[in-house]
Structures are given as C-alpha cells and as structure tokens.
Amino acid sequence: MTTTSPPPAPTPSNVIQVAVPVPLARVFDYDCSELPVVGARVKVPFGRRELVGICLGSATPSEGGYQRKAVQAVLDTETVLPKAVFELLQWAASYYQHPIGEVLAHGLPTLLRQGEAANYQTTQGIRVTAAGEQVELNSLRRAPQQQRLLATLRKGPLLRRDLVSQELSPSALKALTDKGLVENFAHQPLTATDWSFAMGSDALQLNPEQALAVAAMGAATKPQTYLLEGVTGSGKTEVYLQAMASVLQKGRQVLVIVPEIGLTPQTLRRFQQRFAVPIVMLHSALTDRERLDAWLDAKHGGAAIVIGTRSAIFTPFAQLGMIIVDEEHDNSLKQQEGFRYHARDLAVVRGQKEQVPVILGSATPSLETLNNAEQQRYVHLQLTQRAGQAKPARFSLVDIKQMPLKAGLSIPLIERMKKELERGKQVLVFLNRRGYAPALMCHECGWLAQCQRCDAYFTVHQRQQLLQCHHCGAHQRLPKQCFDCGSTQLVGQGVGTEQVEQTLTELFPEHPVLRIDRDSTRKKGALQQHLTDATENKYPILVGTQMLAKGHHFPHVTLVALLDVDGALYSSDFRAAERLGQLITQVAGRAGRASEPGIVVLQTHHPEHDLLQDLIQNGYGAFARSLLQERRITQLPPFGQLALFRAEAHEAQQAQQALQAIAALVPHHPDIMVLGPMPAIMERRAGRYRYQLLLQCQQRGLRQQVLQHLLPKLEGLAELRRVRWSLDVDPQDL
Ligand code: ADP
Ligand code: ZN
Ligand code: ZN
C-alpha cells in the first residue's frame, strides 16, 4: 500500500460579476480570491487588454464552457460610486439601453477610470508671498492681468483650479511666481466640517412673483420638480439663490447644472458673491487631477455648491439637498454621442430617487417640460415681468423680399443701427453661420466648391484664405481659379459672420466691431475676454452666432437683429419651430437689459408666416402651447416616444441593410410605427453614408419593452458588424 499526499486544496475562490467598459450589453464573470464590495473597482484582463471594471456582486459560477479569468487587483475597499449615483447610472443604462460597463465608467472621473486611488493627492493652492504683500500694486499697471491676480490673492489664497473660472490668467500666475510675488502651496482638501452656511452679499428684495416662487418651494411638504418659467431678465437666478439659501442653511449641498460653463462667468460670480461657502466648478479647463479633487470635495461634503455642465449630474454628494437645471431647454444638456443621456431628465430622476427638490429654469421651456408642468407632474411657477426696471423688447419684422442687401443687412436695419449707434448705444447682429460665405461659386460656369467627403459645400474663410468643410473639418487653400473652367471669377455665395463683420466695419468706420463665434474664440480665454469687452461696451457693434444668444447681460444693447430666420420655418426637423422660438426669444432677451427698452429686428422673406406671427404677437409661452397642440395631434414628443437607430458605412447599401435587419425584428403592433431606413439629412459625411430608422411608440412603456426585446438580438446580426451603429433614445436631432 502506498500513501499518496492529498491533492492540494484549491485556493478559496469567488466568482464575481464585473461591469467592464466595453460596448457590450452584458456583465462578465471573473474569479477573485477575495470578495470585493459591490461598487469597488477591479482590474481585469479583457481580451489582450487590461481594463478597470466595477464589481456588481458575486455570481453563481456557470458550468462548463469557457475558462474564467481572474481579477488582477481589487482597487477599492469601499464602493467608489455611492449608492445614489450607482442607482442613477443603472437606471440610465436601462432607460437609454446603453451597455452598463460604459455607463458606469461614465460616472467616474478619468483618473478613477484609469485605476488611480480614489483619494486626494495634494490640491494646489496659490497665495501671495511677503514680497507680494509689500509691492505697490501700481507698479504692475502695465500688466493688468498680473495686477488683477495679485489684488485678488491679497484678499485670500485661491485654488489653482479656480483660476480660469475666476477669469484670472495662468500666464499672469507664471509671471508673478517668477517675480517671487506669488507662490504655490499644498492646500488641505475640503472636508465636510470646513464650511458652515454664511451669506456674502445681501439678498435682493423679491418682487411678488419671485416671492411666490420661493415661498412655494419652501412650503412643499415633499420634494418635487418645479418648472420656473420666467421671461429673460425676470430674476430666475435670484429665485435660485434664495431657494438655495434655505437648503445650504441646513448644511445640505446644491448641484447646479448649466449648459456651457465657459459662457456664464457672470452667473458664477453672483453665486460667489452671495454665499460665503465653498463652491466647486466642474469645467472643461480642469486637469484630470483637479477634476478628481473636485469630485472628492463633493463626495465628502466639502463642497457646498457644485456648478457644472451635463456630466455633473453624476457627481456624488454626501448630503445632496437640491438640484437646479438652468436653461433646461438647452440642447447641450443632451449628450450627442456614445452614452446619449439627457442631463435634465436624469436630474428629475435623481431628484425622485434622492428625495430632493429639482428646479428646472428657463425663459423658453422645452415642450417636454412644459407638458409635464401642464399635466401637473411638475409645479409650474411663472415670472412674467422683467425684474428691476428692464422693459420687454419690441419686435419689428423687416420683409426683405426683393430688397437689396449688403452682406445680409437691409437698408431699414442699417438705418436703425445708425440711430442707436449715434445715441451711444450698442447693437447686436446675430447670424448662425460662421465664416465669410457658406459657399464658393464660379461666376462663369456655376461650379461650386464641394467637400469630397460630405454632401456639403465648403465655407469660405477669407481671413485665413481657406476653404473649410464645417462637417468633417477638411480644408484647403482658397483657390484662385475655377476647378472646372479655370475662370478666376470666383464669388462667395451667401453670408457668414466674417463678412457681416467686414461690411459693418466699412459702414461704420467710427464704431469698432467685435465678432464672437467659434473662429474668433479659439484661443484659451478669448471668449471670456470678448464677453467682458462686450458687456463693458468697448465695442458698440457685436456680431455673433448662437454663442451670443445664451444668458449674457449686455446692459448697453438696445437693438438686436437676426439676419435670417427663414431656414427654420420650412425645416424637416419637427423640433425646428420650437428651436426657432427659443432662439428668437433668447436673442431678444439680450436687448434692453437695463432701463432702456430694446428693439428686435427680424429679417425674413415670410413676415406673414403663422409661426412668426404667433411668436411675436403672443410670446413664447403661447407659441409653445400651440406647438404642443400640434405635437399631440401628430403623436410626436412629448406625446409619442421616439427611439432612433443610426447606421453609417462606406457603402450606402450596408447602412441600409443593417437598419432593415433591425426593422425586421420590430414586433408588429398598432401602437408602434417604424419609419425608414431613410437617409440622414446629410446623407454622406466624412466619407460615410448615414441612414436612420425611427421607432415611434404611443407609450413610453411600450417603447422600453420593444427596445428590451430588440437589443439582445442585435449582437448576433451579421449586417450590423459591417457598420457603425447606435441607438438614441429620446433623440433631439433627427
Ligand atoms: P434671468 O436669469 O431670469 O434672466 P436674472 O436673474 O439674471 O434674470 O435677473 C436679471 C437682472 O435683474 C439682474 O441684474 C438681477 O440682479 C436683477 N434682479 C433680479 N431680481 C431682482 C429684484 N427682485 N429686484 C431688483 N433687481 C432684481
Ligand atoms: Zn467655372
Ligand atoms: Zn466634409
């Protein structure tokens, strides 16, 4: 008899489910020698890569089949995503039918996605040195940026990451540091005990409508969603501030979502002036480390107020007390690629889950929100008067049929501008097309310079001497001769902001012109500088694209002109009318902010058009309510529920076939309509053919059922492997 040693005992092993950031709608099983907590990050092998995933709990090991791989490292001892955010992300993954691994990764700052430890390194502060305290401020008068930075720091140290949002210049910081007037130091991170509520400046005396709104929010017995519909300049921000005060007073935090943070320094300043509490801003100029620090400040409770763009909706909080979504109608709240969520809609969901009030504010609410208010799912609060002394602007339609135009400007408009400028007032000219001209044509043979990769013409950029495609970025030197006939008679077709700027400079040589569009604000800090200059009336004439339409106060502007509103009147996009109404109303809101009433000039070939008449005679509120009636009849959102599949490929047929394969899987049902496959508005872009398939369902529940039935089947479709495809639930752009 021989004795054999017993086989080695297997190392105790757990099987866990991991959400891995890959575009597959499923979770993966891994062996793990320990049992990580749910929500902890784990490093796992995936194919040939190493990825950071999130543990979703233990799994029952499935028999047979493939060889499970082992977790390489457990990165956290506690959940990295607090319960509330975790649940919000899971809800969103299911609602938007987006792969859970990618959605969860979306909830993490970049450094955490890469596996960095979820804690502070050092936060960089900046402060004045002894030499900096002593030096004469006046000695820096030739360097105003440095002078301003030094003056600010003398009032107290700053976090380095707040430089940009306070409109202070990083190069001025470097200069002052080199001179020994300013130094870096390791700032202690904020902790929950670091702040207690304190007012900065005094609150304004509310007008009756504002008072009613604030009181309604204070009196609610249970958390609700509020629509604060207030005309531009009606003092919505003041309502936010006073509603926030009582939340902050209880030691709870407030999340404020804004469309584009670079555009609202004035709003930020008002928050900072009002409350002496730590305010954290999540903006695109933050480094990855700064973003993680800000995220931790919110999570640990050190930040009293967090202000950020759409992705801030996933910020964790120790004690969330209120969510505010400003300009809730703004399209930039919807993510347009990858995980296509709407931050406003998620704010409402988060408010319900965390039992905190949500305020949606806008002068031009989206039809979705308006309908929710009318159905009394939201509390509807209205501010119908401009606050202070500001008066509503008056509209004036200029019929430009058969009128001679100078770079898109009619004579009556030019005359009006002249009058305002001579009175020392400021005028704003709005045109949503940058560049010099939207096309280049040969005067002899009619040839048009077209992008090779898109169904689009090249835009002429005169100053840079370039032809540029605004859809794929392709560009080339401005040609001197026609590619077809060789003629040198090439002329720009149509008008862009660059041309308007040039023409206005010629027409009004004594009044400097400032153009604000994507081209003129490319340099870091340029937008802030331009906006400051515009507000201070350094330039009596402002020309710009929709960048100028949003939320700024230009107190000296008394005349606003929209050069071309016709495009939207006959668009195929069912949201075009809503958007036009919002745009006109928002742009109009820039006029007459101070005591002077403003005039809004709309140039159009269709002054009699019902939409325009409804808007200018009855205002956005009534206009939107009649659009809502139309949507009800046509069963479009918010009454019908949409889901859009998009596919693109080098061959049109492949994109079509992919969508046909999806369409074939949609169950037949009287309440489901399938439209397409049809070409996208621009069929070819960047060398790819683009098609779409629209599902229109009468109820949201039905749409969700259909998608849940459909999605798992798509992974197996051979037709889909040849194309790039995506699903957009509640699409904003068709
Ligand atoms: P909105 O956000 O609705 O466009 P704002 O909140 O920016 O309007 O307010 C417009 C202007 O009116 C601001 O200059 C603000 O300081 C002022 N304002 C707001 N509420 C009051 C008030 N109750 N009394 C006096 N001025 C006010
Ligand atoms: Zn030609
Ligand atoms: Zn192109």
Image (spheres, grey):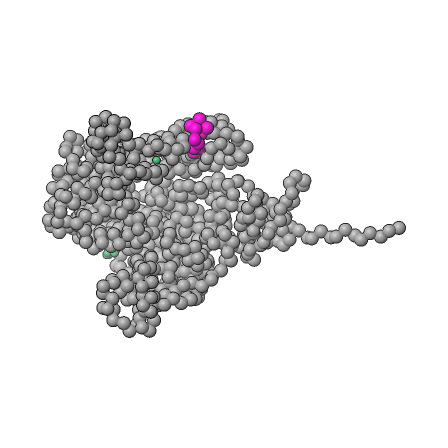
Place of residue 297 in the rendered image (x, y in percent of width and height, measured from the top left): 43, 60
> Residue placed at 49% from the left, 51% from the top?
113
Residue 228 lies left or right of residue 298; in this view the side is left
Report the label total.
0
Can the viewer see residue 136? yes
Q: Quadrant of the C terminus?
A: top left
Whether residue 174 is in magenta: the answer is no
- Snapshot quadrant of residue 613: top left
Place of residue 35 in the rendered image (x, y in percent of width and height, measured from the top left): 62, 53
Place of residue 487 in the rendered image (x, y in percent of width and height, measured from the top left): 22, 29
Vertical position of residue 659 compared to residue 91: above or below: above
Residue 641 lies left or right of residue 424; in this view the side is right
Front-most of 68 and 581?
68
Most extreme residue toward the right, as rendered? Answer: 1
> Residue placed at 44% from the left, 32% from the top?
649
Vertical position of residue 705 compared to residue 344: above or below: above
> Residue placed at 24% from the left, 32% from the top?
481
> Residue placed at 41% from the left, 55% from the top?
287
Place of residue 306 in the rendered image (x, y in percent of width and height, measured from the top left): 39, 56
The residue stretch that appears in magenta: 646-656
Can the viewer see residue 656? no
Front-most of 696 and 422?
422
Residue 184 lies left or right of residue 15; in this view the side is left
Residue 385 lies left or right of residue 244; in this view the side is left
